[in-house]
Amino acid sequence: MNFKNILEQLNLPAQCRKYGLALWECPQFLFLIMGLIIILSILASYAIGTKYIDDPYIVALVVIGITLILIVLTYIITRSFERLAEANRMKSEFVSIVSHQLRAPLSNLKWTIDLLLSEKIDLEKEKGLEFLEVLEQNTQRMGDLISDLLTVSRIEQGKFVARNKNVYLKDLVDEVVKEMSIFCKTNNASVTFEPEEGLPQISVDPSQIKIVITNLLDNAIRYINTGGKVDIKLKKAGKDLYFEVKDNGVGIPEGDQKHIFQKFFRSRNALKKQTNGSGLGLYIAKSIVEKAGGKIDFESQEGSGSTFWFSLPIK
């Protein structure tokens, strides 16, 4: 933890705002109060001990023992409150994000359906087909959000079972790039894929790893500017296969980077661009990769783009 992070932790009002709690309900404030209680307890224990116990070594041991017990209890209690506060924050974010992500497609659906039912347009004409496409796109958006929520639920319940088989990771990347070609054209983004030759097979669940690749590539395309560039690399690195997605997009602010793999988290840049997203993709990707025995991480600089990578063991 660097000095900047320490200062952030000591900023009690900011920490409380993050959890959406009043000062006296905030875990950090409670930790401070418990610290004062420990100090008072130490002084009281020492005063009582010196009054009734002649041996100063025994007094010191008693005071040290009481201090350790209080510190452990303080840590346990504070961590419990912190987990509750975090759960409360995530619940609020969940409601906010889901409401936001569903409001737009539902409004579009209602508007389109009302127009279709009004019989003011002819479905046989090109304009009518455009309205049907709007219905399909917005239905797909809601379906994607529900799918992400169900995936997170299965991950947390331990029911997201991997069905491994030997596959070439290059083939999975080719499939994802092909499937997202229309999305690339829509965003005027160029994607290059440079795989190393002669890469071995790995034992993974292909459907789950495709989710990881799709999420990383989707983010790279979604958060670049018009005419942006995305480079994909795949190579062998020791006993692992190394996959990398690099873009020249908006990048991630330094203050947001430590939260990037958290559920429902979306960086300030993502919110400014007003792109669609639930804040679940990277959480799902990290869960899948780590469950497969791999590692996932990233490097990013605001305004200069991001590089996300993961490695999977060759078995």
Image (tube, grey):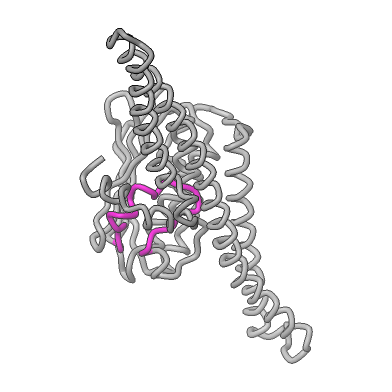
How far across and down, in percent of the image, does residue 110 sit?
A: 70, 77
Q: Furthest-front residue in view?
A: 51
302 left or right of 150?
A: left
Q: Quadrant of residue 186?
A: bottom left
Establish if 68 lies above or below 225: above
In-front residue for pair 276/54: 54
Residue 76 in the figure: left or right of residue 200: right
| Quadrant assignment, res 127 | bottom right
The structure residue drawn at horizontal position 30% and vertical position 63%, both measured from the top left corner, is 250
Q: Residue 203, relative to residue 37: is it above or below?
A: above
The reply to whether the magenta stretch includes residue 134 is no
Question: Splitting the image into 4 quarters, where does residue 130 fall?
Answer: bottom right
Residue 299 horizontal side relative to residue 124, left or right: left
Q: Position of residue 188 (x, y in %)?
A: 37, 69
Left or right: residue 307 versus residue 112 is left
Inspect this view and state whether residue 214 appears. Answer: no
Give the quadrant of the N terminus: top left
Q: In the image shown, does 56 or 277 lie closer to the viewer?
A: 56
Pick the quarter of the image with the C terminus: top left
Outermost residue toward the left? 3
Identify which residue is drawn at 62% across, 51% down: 147
Vertical position of residue 306 compared to residue 100: above or below: above
- Image coordinates for residue 309, horizontal then vertical, percent: 33, 42
Q: Position of residue 38 (x, y in %)?
A: 38, 32
The residue that appears at 39% across and 49% down in the rendered structure is 259
Q: Is residue 253 magenta?
A: yes
What is the magenta range?
249-269
